[in-house]
Image (cartoon, rainbow, N blue to C red):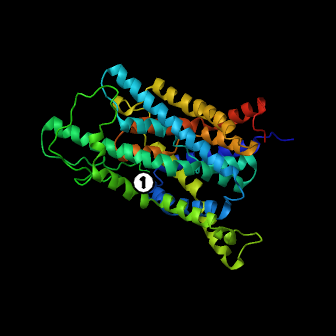
Amino acid sequence: MSWTYLPVLNKLIQIIVTILIGFGTEAFGIIPAALFVPQAVQLVFKILLPSLIVKGVGIGIDFYAQRNIWAFIVAFLILRAIALIIAFCVVLCKNWNAKKPVNGLGDVAVLWLSFTWISTVIMGVPICSAVFGNPNIGLVYGLMAGMSSFIFQLPLQLIFFEYHVIEQRWTREILYAVQPVPVAPAPMKDSTVVTVEAADTSDHSAAHSNEVPPVDRRWWSIVNFRYMSQTALWFEIFKRLYTNPILIALFVGFVLSLSTAGKYLRCPSDTCIVGLQWVGDTLGWLGDCVSPLSLLAMGSWMHRQHYFSSSESERISILKLCFFMICKLIVIPLLMVGLAKLMRLNDEAGRAAILIASLPISMASFSLGHQYNIGEKDLSANVTAGTVLMLPTIIVWNLVLDAVSLYPL
């Protein structure tokens, strides 16, 4: 009799090997990351992932019959809210130690990404599929876990990052006492991952006022509400949200599922319209490309990072990285254990939630930091370290859950 988690181990090795192949394509000059990564990610986040979402949410899920799905989504929403509170507390502690507001909303956003911008689809779907032995189950849980990031975390992240851009601009005006100078995002580097359009911080991003904001803020003053009143800040955020392909796909998926129109595209089934089977098949075919292409791009991107750079500005301290890994791989899953109990998830949903919560953060987190020019080295190190530790983390969490008879398979 084979080991219970041999299929999971095989899937984890498959993921790691795919990442290594991507790493090799850049290392040996087969496809330069500067060419491959941006184009691959544009394809994934504008066509392939939206196709997967419409297929999974609109056709694959019946929100009326699968009521436990709502509790699963709420569990992840609460987890992200708790992580946001923790991020605020960490920033406040840093400011209290410095006796001044040295960290702001941009730093809160980076910490929040480090805790809960989980790779729910790219890694979550194949791993849950292997754990439960059913690709459809893996797709449902991966997409539902990711849904909370797009309807809750993404909008707030954009507010925090856009505020950071405006705050930096005002700081420059105060320091140099000149007319506003646009603070554009850092030039796109070789390693580019795009999930949200890069911030347009041209002169329409923040309205200029002749008033000079006070610089003697208290240590607990993370937010200067004068910046929040900038009309362009909200315009930019709204524009990025309503033009985001992922959110559009989620909306279409919800409409198909809640209107019950999706059941006519669910084939094979009693309600399937055979002449329309090509719709679901095409969406599924494109969606199947999401994980392999994304993992190849991740490997290529990893080769371009400066993990062992001699430059202090490009390195993250070991102690800091250990803090992030303990939070992401141990604390966050433990919080999910409590939330799964709180939401009364069944055995299958409970285990899926805990395993997904233990996954590393997505490469897309680095993209947001890169585009807004904050926290790049931290996010880059977190993505890589979490990915390296993914195999033992998933196996250990499965064994621990079995040992305490919690959410058995």
Q: Residue furthest left?
A: 178
Drawn side of residue 281 relative to residue 97, left or right: right
Drawn side of residue 204 relative to residue 19, left or right: left
Which residue appears at 39% of the width and 37% of the height? Answer: 375
Which residue appears at 29% of the width and 37% of the height? Answer: 224
In the image, 172 versus 323, the foreground residue is: 172
Drawn side of residue 149 relative to residue 228, left or right: right
Q: What residue type is disc 1 on? A: Val
Q: Residues within 10 Å of mark 1 (few under 14, many from 20)?
A: some
Which residue appears at 76% of the width and 29% of the height? Answer: 404
Query: For the C terminus, which image quadrant?
Result: top right
Q: Quadrant of residue 309?
A: top left
Picture coordinates of residue 200, whole percent (x, y): 30, 54
Picture coordinates of residue 147, whole percent (x, y): 56, 51
Picture coordinates of residue 264, whole percent (x, y): 68, 72
Q: Residue furthest bottom?
A: 275
Residue 4 vertical placement versus 288 (above, below): above
Residue 105 vertical placement versus 209 (above, below): above
Residue 360 visible from this viewpoint: no
Q: Which residue is mark 1?
A: 196
Which residue appears at 66% of the width and 37% of the height? Answer: 342
| Total number of numbered discs in the rendering | 1
Query: For the N terminus, which image quadrant?
Result: top right
Residue 331 visible from this viewpoint: yes
Drawn side of residue 346 relative to residue 145, left or right: right
In the image, 119 versus 103, the foreground residue is: 103
